[in-house]
Structures are given as C-alpha cells and as structure tokens.
Image: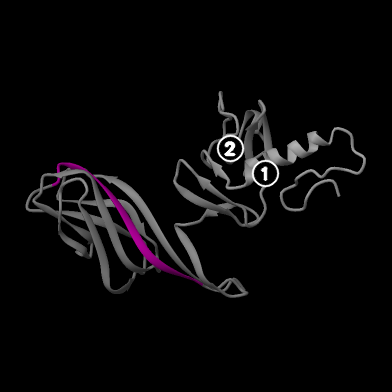
Amino acid sequence: MSDSTHLALPFVEAAQAQKHVTVNETFTRLDALVHLGVENAAEITPPVSPVEGARWIVGQGASGAWAGEDGNVAAWIDGAWVFLAPKAGWQAWDVEARKLLIHDGSNWTAGPSGTVAALTPNAAATRIETIEIDHTIVAGMFNDTALSIPDRAIVFGVTGRVLADVTGPSSWTLGVAADSGRYGNSIGLTAGSTVNGVSGTPTAYYGATLVRVTATGSDFTGGTLRLAVHYLILDIPAA
C-alpha cells in the first residue's frame, strides 16, 4: 500500500531515497484537509491569483484547470492545483456562505442548517432544520418573502432581526397569509430590533407557505430584515 486509506496520504517506502519529499507531501495534504475551510463550494472557474493554501470545493460543470474535478477539494499548493477526492463523513466550513458542509459519499450537503435527531435502518428520519434569508422590503402593506416553510414542516417558530431601519409603518407583524401576526406583533423598526416568534404549539403546514411581513398603520417604504424558520421534518422509510 503506497497511500493511506482515508486521506490518501503517501507512505514512505522501505529504503526509499529522498524520504523528506514524501513526508513533506503528507504534511502538505494534512495541512490542506485538517480543519478544512473552503473559500466557497460553488465556484466553477479557477481563480486567477489564488493565495497559497487557499481551498475550494469545485462546483458542478467546472472549467479550465478544474474541469472534471466537480465536488473535489481544490487546493492551491506550491503554485499548482492539488485535487483531493472527498469521502463520506468529510466536513468542510464554507467561509463565504458561513455554513458547515458534510460529504455523504456522493455529494456535499448542508450541515448546521439541519441535523438528524433519529434515523432508522431504512432511512425514516426525524430532522430538525433552520432556513434563513435576508429580505429587502418593497413598498406596500405587506410583503410575501422568499422564505418558504416547507410542505409537511412542523414549525417551532419564526425569528427575525431588522438589518436596516424599516420605514413607513409604526410597527410590523410577522406571520403567514392565513395569520399575519402568528409569529409576532408590534415589532420594532430600528436596526437591531428582533422578534422571537415561538409557536404556541408546534404548527404543521400542509403545503409550502411563504412567510409574510405586514405593516401596521401605514405601508412599508423600505428596510431590510433577516428571517429564519425553525422546524421539524419527518422522512418516510426509503423501503
């Protein structure tokens, strides 16, 4: 065996000359992979002037020097690209998206936005997930945001933070079309204001449902919000 099983680290062979070359190659790969943090996981074009040691997860349909390396880790080491093929269980921090990625043996999937609380041998699962968006308010009495509660989600609550002052109304509410204040009323307008809209009881949604923000008193004229839905998903057995 010339390489290690999991990280493909080169071994020093018996009576090998220039052993330091192999040892340094092993250290270089460890340096690239241990506590793996990538610039992003969607880039398909190699950067023109990468910084020594910088790493990316190659996106689908990559071109140039990255062609054919989709999903692999690309590291710029000693002036050249080194590609490392991930295995199930590898983890990487996406610096740009600020999220943990986990490789399932085939693809990189989101980590901290969702976790499996229980899993059966046939893949029936209880998943706890959180999704988050930033929403720029458009003028009007209400905005249906791009934050969508998934079909069959059991929602624990919706939270939010004002990123840029909300202008127009005297306050605002957070909810859905069926109940505009389900997750909060009389919410503040200034940047830094928050809402922690805990469900009175976990609420099940039978169909994808957009989160709505509604103005109180007067129409919205501007502002930016960060909103998140916290929910439970049940996966049926795969077989």
Please identify the residue farthest to the right as the structure is shown: 15
Q: Is residue 116 left or right of residue 135?
A: right
Residue 39 location in percent, x, y?
Answer: 52, 38
The one nearer the camera, 32 or 80, is 32
Residue 165 location in percent, x, y?
Answer: 18, 43
The one nearer the camera, 23 or 39, is 23
177 above or below 30? Answer: below
- Where does the magenta region start and end? 220-235
110 above or below 57? Answer: below
Q: Is residue 135 left or right of residue 100?
A: left
- Classify 10 Å Cα crowding around label 1: few (below 14), some (14-19), many (20 and above): some
* Number of the label disc, if any, that sits on residue 55: 2
For discs 2 and 1, the disc positioned in front in the rendered view: 1
* Number of the label disc, if any, that sits on residue 30: 1
| Residue kind at label 2, given as amino acid type | Arg
40 above or below 101? Answer: above
In the image, is residue 221 part of the stretch drawn in magenta? Answer: yes
* Number of the label disc, if any, that sits on residue 186: none
Q: Quadrant of the C terminus?
A: bottom right
Give the mark nearer the N terminus: 2 vs 1: 1
User: Disc 2, disc 1: CB below 8 Å?
Assistant: no
Residue 147 location in percent, x, y?
Answer: 33, 54
Residue 88 location in percent, x, y?
Answer: 65, 56
The answer to whether residue 160 is seen in the rendering is yes
In the image, is residue 117 part of the stretch drawn in magenta? Answer: no
